[in-house]
Image: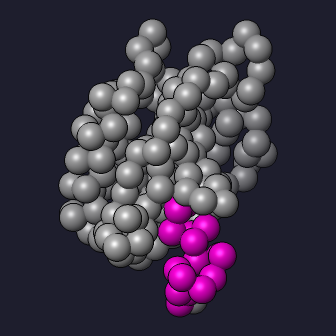
Amino acid sequence: MEFLKFEDDREAQTVFWHSSAHMLGESLEHVTGAYLTIGPPLNSGFYYDSYMGDESLQESDYKTLETEFGKIAKAKQPFERMVVTKEEALGLFKYNPFKVEIISSKVPDGSRTTVYKCGDLIDLCRGPHLPNTGKVKAFSCTSHSATQWLAKDGNDSLQRMYGISFPDKKMLK
């Protein structure tokens, strides 16, 4: 275990925003029923891409997602690392064709991969993460856009939600 301070350490910010991306993913699943694809940290915040069929994100969704995110933070859900076989991973994500494609193409047969559980969200991930969601004290949806699966023309259209989060509400202001 390593203790990092958000204000002074780029790695700490990356771990913080990576964990926050999982929380945004959980929020998107709860609010929209979306199929999650990928959700990485960025230099300043994070995003999560999700498949919503013919639906699309609107600015009017921001408040609902922020409220759900706040509930997840308040619940102080632990980030639990699990090591699973490729076959177990395929079973966990059989409902999500995007995760199945990632597992099928990236995880070698006969090997294992890691997933993280946070509340009712289970997601493919290497980690590391915050100890729990309660460390995130402030969050805001910042923008949204459309993209395509694997950034390839002709692939399914995805909705991308960008966010920013901090360990202190004053930092959000």
Q: In this view, does 91 lie to the left or right of 60?
A: right
Q: Which colour scheme is used?
A: one colour
Q: Is residue 166 left or right of residue 160?
A: left
Q: Is residue 18 visible?
A: yes
Q: In which quarter of the image is residue 88?
A: top right
Residue located at (33% from left, 38% from top): 62
Q: In which quarter of the image is the C terminus?
A: bottom left
| Towards the viewer: 147 or 128 | 147
Reply above or below: 43 against 37.
Answer: below
Residue located at (67% from left, 39% from top): 103
| Residue 149 point in image, percent of width and height | 67, 25
Reply above or below: 4 against 169.
Answer: below
| Residue 151 point in image, percent of width and height | 74, 27
Does the magenta-highlighted stretch encompass residue 85? no
| Towards the viewer: 68 or 63 | 63
Does the magenta-highlighted stretch encompass residue 9? yes
Residue located at (55% from left, 28% from top): 145
Q: In this view, does 73 lie to the left or right of 142?
A: left
| Towards the viewer: 122 or 64 | 64
Reply above or below: 168 against 81.
Answer: below
Q: In which quarter of the image is residue 138?
A: bottom left
Q: In which quarter of the image is the N terminus?
A: bottom right
| Towards the viewer: 27 or 123 | 27
| Residue extent of the magenta highlight | 3-18
Residue located at (73% from left, 29% from top): 150
How many numbered marks appear? 0
Q: Is residue 70 left or right of residue 10?
A: left
Q: Is residue 77 visible?
A: no
| Residue 79 point in image, percent of width and height | 41, 66
